[in-house]
Every structure is written in C-alpha cells, then in structure tokens.
Amino acid sequence: MLVRDAMSTVVLTIGPTHTLRQAARLMSARRIGAAVVHDPDTCGLGIITERDILNAVGSGQDPDVETAATHTTTDVVFAAPAWTLEEAAEAMTHGGFRHLIVLDDNGPVGVVSVRDIIRCWAPTGRRPAELVG
C-alpha cells in the first residue's frame, strides 16, 4: 500500500504568525493532528503538531501570544505519494516523529500520520478481544 492510499488529503496550511490558540482551533475543527506552516518570507514549509502546542501550553507559555513560528519544526522530512507505507514508517521511526507532509510537484497534497498507517495495517471487522485470542 502507498502513502497516497493512506494519507489525509485535509491539509491545513497556516502562517507563522498564527497564534497557538488559532492553530489549535483550526486543527480541532478539522479533526487533524498537524498543520503545515508556510512562511512566505523564507519560502519554506514546516509542520506544527498537537504535541508542539501541548508542550508549549504545558510549560506555561501563553497560547494567545506564542506564534506558530516559534514552535514549528522546519527540518522536515517530506514523503512522496508513491512511497510505500513501510518507507513512511521507517522515516517516522528514524526521525522520531508521527506525521509526514506529503508533497508532489505542486506542493503539499496530504499528511500521513502513524494513525493512518496503523489503520491501513490493522485487521478490520474484528473486536479487540478477538485479536488477543
């Protein structure tokens, strides 16, 4: 199975000046765990995740003052839609992260998460008790 088959095509793109609260609201409304951060001044793409926001708030930072720019991961590993799920899982494991931005020639086309991969690999139609068996 390929990344294109598992990825979420709901791509939330925010700017670096969005506050953490704004980012959290947008992510929550779309029921996603990560947002692409596009900084037009650097022409770069980064990612901010629910964990980044949680860590900031948990350490006492004000979500109405802190911006996405300060909490964005800019050293990003991108996936291609034609990668296998094994390649995506290996990149996540090697990098220690749970989301990959999926790029094609035109830019971001999706985000694939660990949850997406597990959903594809896990057997369907069976209750958890039946799996323990």
Image: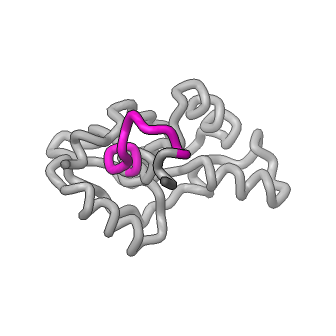
Q: In this view, does 128 lie to the left or right of 114?
A: right
- 13 versus 104 height, above or below: above
Which residue is farthest right? Answer: 60
Q: Which of 60 and 19 is in front in this view?
A: 60
Q: Which colour scheme is used?
A: one colour
Q: Where is residue 28 in the image (x, y as percent from the top left)?
A: 61, 31
Residue 63 visible? The answer is yes
Which residue is farthest front? Answer: 133
> Residue at 23% across / 40% down in the picture?
5
> Residue at 32% across / 45% down in the picture?
120
> Residue at 58% across / 25% down in the picture?
29
**Which of the 4 image quarters holds residue 74?**
bottom left
Which residue is farthest bottom? Answer: 94
**Which of the 4 image quarters holds residue 23?**
top right
Q: Nearer the viewer, residue 98 or 123?
A: 123
**Which of the 4 image quarters holds residue 36?**
top left
- 32 versus 39 height, above or below: above
> Residue at 50% across / 60% down in the picture?
73
Magenta-colored span: 118-129
Let me know if residue 62 is in the magenta part: no
Q: Position of residue 27 (x, y in %)?
A: 56, 34
Which residue is farthest top? Answer: 29
Q: Nearer the viewer, residue 67 or 126?
A: 126
Residue 41 visible? The answer is no
Q: Where is residue 95 in the image (x, y as percent from the top left)?
A: 42, 71
Q: Is residue 97 left or right of residue 85?
A: right
Q: Nearer the viewer, residue 101 or 68?
A: 101
